[in-house]
Amino acid sequence: QVQLVQSGAEMKKPGASVKVSCETSGYPFTTYGISWVRQAPGQGLEWMGWISGNNDKTDYARKFQGRVTMTTDTYTSTAYMEVRSLRSDDTAIYYCARDQGDYGNYGDMDVWGQGTTVTVSS
Amino acid sequence: EIVLTQSPGTLSLSSGDRATLSCRASQIVSDNYLAWYQRKPDQAPRLLIYGASNRATGIPDRFSGSGSGTDFTLIISRLEPEDCAVYYCQQYGSSPPTFGQGTKLEIK
């Protein structure tokens, strides 16, 4: 059974950083990429970027370039996403999802993590 | 980037009815790479349809997708109370992948 299990909720102050983990199981980790998607309160879903399962390629949405870093650990089949210089409008639920596509040709997201709530407040 | 516009914003129907949800793209969606997701409160999104018309694993045949080019439709037949959710379309034919703003389905 394919599962993605994310780390717990975080509360951060503006200017801080947060790193969310996404532990996967039930499939060969390096075979699929991971997309990260967020949903701010009252907003829709927003694709943040993608990382290959073997950590050799990343692609970030333009608005997150320079502020977000995605990595993977192939030994533990875990993906990570770090967001730096947090602002109040980064308050959102952050999801990881297994992506059926490849670098530059992303796919549908067939399995999702349960989500990690990140609250940014002074 | 491709902008997806979903309509209606909210749909209020009764159990047993048929729901028709629309997703219109600002440009042609390459290879009809269009997916639909269901998001219930406090749950992660769930893939329903990929490639415009293919049901994901375990999705009942009450859910069907159609369309091509710039116009896509999700139909949910024989509505059940558990179908109450927000439905999102997503295109992945062009980078960056983008989502529609969602259609909220209420079951009266």
Image: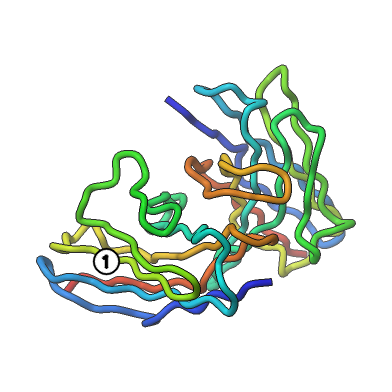
Q: Is residue A113 left or right of residue B38?
A: right
Quadrant holding the N terminus of chain B? bottom right
Name the residue at the left extreme.
Answer: B16
Front-lying residue, B81 or B78: B78
- Residue B94, quarter of picture: bottom right
Front-lying residue, A99 or A84: A99
Q: Position of residue A31 (x, y in %)?
A: 63, 28
- Residue A80, quarter of picture: top right
Name the residue at the top extreme.
Answer: A75
* Residue at 55% across, 47% down: A115
Q: Position of residue A106 (x, y in %)?
A: 63, 50
Q: Is residue B30 above or below residue B10?
A: above
Q: Amino acid at mark 1?
A: Ile
Q: How many marks?
A: 1
Colour logic: rainbow
Q: Is residue A100 above or below residue B94?
A: above
Quadrant holding the C terminus of chain B? bottom left
Q: Position of residue A76 (x, y in %)?
A: 68, 20
* Residue at 85% across, 53% down: A84
* Residue at 64% across, 40% down: A34
- Residue A90, quarter of picture: bottom right
The residue tagged 1 is B75
Q: Secondary structure at mark 1?
A: strand
Assess disc 1: are there few (<14), some (14-19) or many (≥20) residues with their C-alpha within 10 Å of its C-alpha. Answer: some
Q: Is residue A2 left or right of residue A63?
A: left
* Residue at 73% across, 64% down: A121
Chain label for disc 1 = B
